[in-house]
Image (spheres, coloured by chain):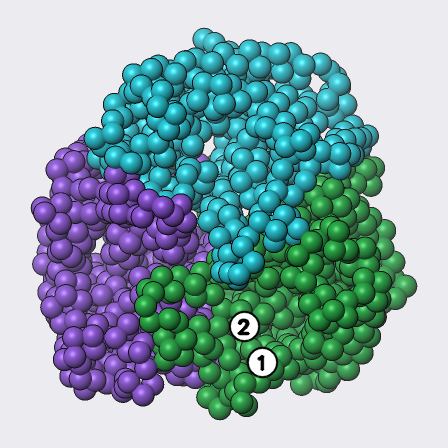
Chain colours: A green, B cyan, C purple
Amino acid sequence: MAESTNMRLRLPLLCIILEVILIILFGALVEYNDDTHAKLWNANKSHSATRDDYENEFYYRYPSFQDVHVMIFVGFGFLMTFLQRYGFSSVGFNFLIAAFSLQWATLMQGFFHGMHHGKIHVGVTSMINADFCTGSVLISFGAVLGKTSPVQLLVMAIFEVTLFAVNEFILLSMLGANDAGGSMTIHTFGAYFGLMVTRVLYRPNLDKSKHRNSSVYHSDLFAMIGTIYLWMFWPSFNSAITNYGDPQHRTALNTYYSLAACTLATFAFSALVNPEGKLDMVHIQNAALAGGVAVGTAGEMMLTPFGSMIVGFLAGTISVLGYKYLTPVLESKLKIQDTCGIHNLHGMPGVLGAVVGAVTSALASPGVYGDGLQRVFADAETGKWNPQSRGGFQAISLAVTLGMALFGGLVTGFILKLPIYGAPPDTHCFEDGLYWEVKTFQYHFYKIKKTSWISSIPQN
Amino acid sequence: MAESTNMRLRLPLLCIILEVILIILFGALVEYNDDTHAKLWNANKSHSATRDDYENEFYYRYPSFQDVHVMIFVGFGFLMTFLQRYGFSSVGFNFLIAAFSLQWATLMQGFFHGMHHGKIHVGVTSMINADFCTGSVLISFGAVLGKTSPVQLLVMAIFEVTLFAVNEFILLSMLGANDAGGSMTIHTFGAYFGLMVTRVLYRPNLDKSKHRNSSVYHSDLFAMIGTIYLWMFWPSFNSAITNYGDPQHRTALNTYYSLAACTLATFAFSALVNPEGKLDMVHIQNAALAGGVAVGTAGEMMLTPFGSMIVGFLAGTISVLGYKYLTPVLESKLKIQDTCGIHNLHGMPGVLGAVVGAVTSALASPGVYGDGLQRVFADAETGKWNPQSRGGFQAISLAVTLGMALFGGLVTGFILKLPIYGAPPDTHCFEDGLYWEVKTFQYHFYKIKKTSWISSIPQN
Amino acid sequence: MAESTNMRLRLPLLCIILEVILIILFGALVEYNDDTHAKLWNANKSHSATRDDYENEFYYRYPSFQDVHVMIFVGFGFLMTFLQRYGFSSVGFNFLIAAFSLQWATLMQGFFHGMHHGKIHVGVTSMINADFCTGSVLISFGAVLGKTSPVQLLVMAIFEVTLFAVNEFILLSMLGANDAGGSMTIHTFGAYFGLMVTRVLYRPNLDKSKHRNSSVYHSDLFAMIGTIYLWMFWPSFNSAITNYGDPQHRTALNTYYSLAACTLATFAFSALVNPEGKLDMVHIQNAALAGGVAVGTAGEMMLTPFGSMIVGFLAGTISVLGYKYLTPVLESKLKIQDTCGIHNLHGMPGVLGAVVGAVTSALASPGVYGDGLQRVFADAETGKWNPQSRGGFQAISLAVTLGMALFGGLVTGFILKLPIYGAPPDTHCFEDGLYWEVKTFQYHFYKIKKTSWISSIPQN
């Protein structure tokens, strides 16, 4: 190896310095919000009614938060365990960078989303938002999976979280965009940021590790744990921070139908693109989720179950076709080595979701939404609302997101190229043994050896 | 192979046609209900109070829905991964037919459970009901596991969902039966439907695949993920669509105690029926769940924790004894090849649950239920309530369910026997490689080979 | 083997006798509480308002209950599957003793926490408390994992649950201590009880099974399922039985930050203590959770995110250092064979949590808490409140807990030493085959054998 991958000093030093900085900044800047503060909450609620405690936002957001939390840590973590020798790193580094990112995101988002007298106020909504931002970093992680050291990943997270918060601020606060489920802010941003990073980190000799860059039987089953959790809880993800009442309810419902239709499209096209009609686990694990991504913007709108199913079906279709036909081209022509195929799961479906959101916004009307219009489109409340311009702002938001992601990924990629992070050599990518104590398989093998009748099993 | 199992045209064609039909029917028939519709929700709620949004049914049903959703996709899906070479199909086909069934069930149940001016209204309750119906299909899947192509499974789902909705309509709407947790509608129906299908599809030469019809160490652990999730969330399943307040609370509590008692019975009888006193994973994975099935009807009633525990203990006992003594007889004498033993987990405990429900209904009285009587038994509200006749209607409901299931399974079985679906040959049942791209174990094995000191491990 | 490990009579007999006793006691003593009883609930609520059903405690406690339930059955169960040949027992015995303990705990806690006219009232809160008590037993299970028969574990649970209820009664009712998340009652108690039991059961020749007392690649991934679920849902655990409103909300938030900081400390010190800077799965699986343990007492107080992060960081640090440096010493010098290292995950962090709780209590003031003071510190309501004496009572509570746990573990250990339970011989510890039907690996191996190109893979 040209360069040491020993993490003994680098990783502890970075983790400890980052956590100390986080603790100091939290000490200086972060306060409980009204719903979590003993004094403020009890001063705000009317003294007569004990019922008031039931109105704490905790009871209306926390179940959604926990579902999102499962998606971040189990969903993303296990989805990436499909590699045969990279399960520890997939779940473990996912765990590490998520734990860091949610703290850093709390600060960055708090900073941009309105300080209260110089303080950042936290509660269950900030927890959800921090998890959302973390999701974006984990999407990018999928592109560079197996080819980066944990130190590189933490450095990437520092920059990506920061830019995420800036982009989110531009979209939600300046452009007034709708993006409750994050088709743009989370998926499009995370995908194109990660694709640009992996482009800059291009390894011409990655072939040397190709025997490890694939799954085995059980690793694919572990990955399905991730897939199924993401699929099941995506309705909670898209609806977690919408307005209360009908928007939250509707978002969950639309996402549920979009995902169901997407799953049928995924199975259909997975069999269709295979010469023997065999299903490919890569498609099932990933493309079946594209329906959740693609209603991330329009899910809270009156998209209807009908519309949701069409969007989901399209998303599953382009995602499978992307895995089959586009990913190899991206690698051979554009030198984009996208380990998990995030372009197919988050990139294209994210852009689709942004476009669907823009169109659905442009078609919104008081006739359809009634008094509910202003509860979906904040502009409507101010009287300045104009559906066509709203659609336009949604489209601009997509363009801004793509620009921020590509530029941010470019800069971050070059920073990650510095030879100081202990990145794995080309011969040892996709290998847990580099950063983890890994045991071998002695005892199991011993049990096998004893079985002498093996040769008598009929051939498959 | 006599017949091609190539899915290249069959599966895509069926999936795409089905999804297009679903989308068209959803476009024509499905509308948001009052709680999910922007206009209707905001028109219904009083304009003065912003608190109203908290009263949206979303907040009182959605956490239960998510638990049910986990049972359907993770619970059923992973429970069936116990087969050594059928993990992809277990989780994957479970995923596919569930995604289809929940859409189709939304239409069928909406059609029978009352159209609103020609439209089907959807919201979180319809999502739960659709998942329930899907559960019934997945139970039947357990009987034919490993012996059917995905095309057959989709065709089975089309018929089973339809008949499920008819049976549910007869029971709940015509006979006024109580069956919140579906001992009859879901478990008894799904089990006897599936058993009849597998009887019709009887394979005299299934022995040729018997070396694959068993578990290995890790596949049993994956299956335990399914078991434990089903066990934990069963209280949510049984209580998901009861009336609000005490019935929902009580149902969860009764189910919790029934399952705990069932688990002790399962361990006791699993050790007792084994000559060496060794526990059998098949029993633990399945029989421990029978306690949830058996309180699916009476769970919402004043069964008491005492009664719940007796029912759970009985359910676990008959389930283990069924696996040990009845399943082999069903196969050898009645030619019923029941891969997962659904007769022991859903069949007998479902019938037990129906009987317990009938008896508990017949014993209900205003003295015990007070003003809560009419919140459990809808008849009581109308003044026509008579506990004995209520018990009688419950018993009739069981008979109707058994008849519908056996007849439906018979017809569906013959339809599935047509040689057009690409069913696996007798020599290749329980084998993922037929329908999935499956990788081999190269790298792991390589690691093992290096370990030269293996022979020095002391023998077990 | 000197002594038979056959469970054929012992286990069924014990399970059936215990369950029959439980059923009889439940029949005699247990009643639905006001929120689960059809008559009482409907009599209590005002007849005019149907909205009242939404105020049932079910809706404010049940989502937390389900998260806790997942931690008990999936979290603890899978965390212990790290052993290569003990996965069935880890998940299975965890399942068995949890199902027993939660029933027994309902009786014991009901008995001590106030009978209502000679009856124990049950509902969602009693379900959470029973699960909490069960958690304590499962912590102790971690110390003796692989070295005990299921009969021994059930006997241990009988005694531990009883003493847990006594200790909890002394702390919460007599000393008026705060301990919502159970740093003392659950973690400290469970850890030192288990450590004392394993000390009494010391096996000088455990070396004979050491080749099985370690993980393999996939068993570590299964264990990570347990870890991640414990980590994600710990905010629900600590907040599950706090008062409604701000305390519950704040507890979840504090736990979330503590765990995030703890995770960074864990990764940092895991790499630092390894000569090659490689991460150790044992640390990641366990130490990353110490942050949840350490805010189990102070989490509901105004600890602030800043304080929570410091506590979490300390907890992760001492936990990793404990695994690396203290566990080997405990084994060699004190003869404490602690299979899972519960001293590092629950023992030390539990004591840390108790100390942090005492200090935070002593620093509480009306200036910080406002009207919320009495909702955290029950004494404040009575006017007798004095922060310093409150801190003192918290410290006394820790001492009582340590005393009860060590004494209880000592007595229980000697009871478990009787040669009647079928404990595994020294040569067969950590081995599923003793108590379970275990299949071998035939088919997989067959697939491997076919692959002839294996030798051509480049060496790692």
Q: Chain of mark 2?
A: A
Q: Closer to the camera, C72 or B172?
A: B172
Quadrant assignment, res C177: bottom left
Q: Check disc 1 and report the residue beneath it.
A: A110
Q: Which residue is painted at 43% across and 66% down in the image? A: A56
Eyeballing the image, is C404 above or below B274? below
Q: Residue at x 32, y 68 (%)?
A: A48
Q: Which mark sits nearer the N-terminus, 1 or 2?
A: 1
In the image, residue A30 sits, relative to residue A180, either above or below, namely: below
Q: Are there few (<14), some (14-19), or many (20+) residues within 10 Å of tag 1?
A: many
Is residue C30 in sight in this rendering? Answer: yes
x, y (%) of residue B316? 32, 30
Q: How many marks?
A: 2
Q: Is residue C191 above or below residue A317?
A: below
Q: Residue at x 54, y 55 (%)?
A: B46
Does residue A192 appear anywhere in the picture? no
Task: Give the position of the N terminus of chain A as an image quadrant.
Answer: bottom right
- On the image, the x and y values in percent for residue C272 come to 47, 81
Q: Where is mark 2, residue-wise?
A: A126
Q: Could you say whether the residue bearing mark 2 is in a helix, strand or loop?
A: helix
Subunit under mark 1: A
Residue A201 lies in quadrant: bottom right
The label number, if any, that marks residue C377 in the structure image: none
Label 1–label 2 contact, CB within 8 A? yes
The foreground one among A161 and A185 is: A185
Name the residue furthest top: B333
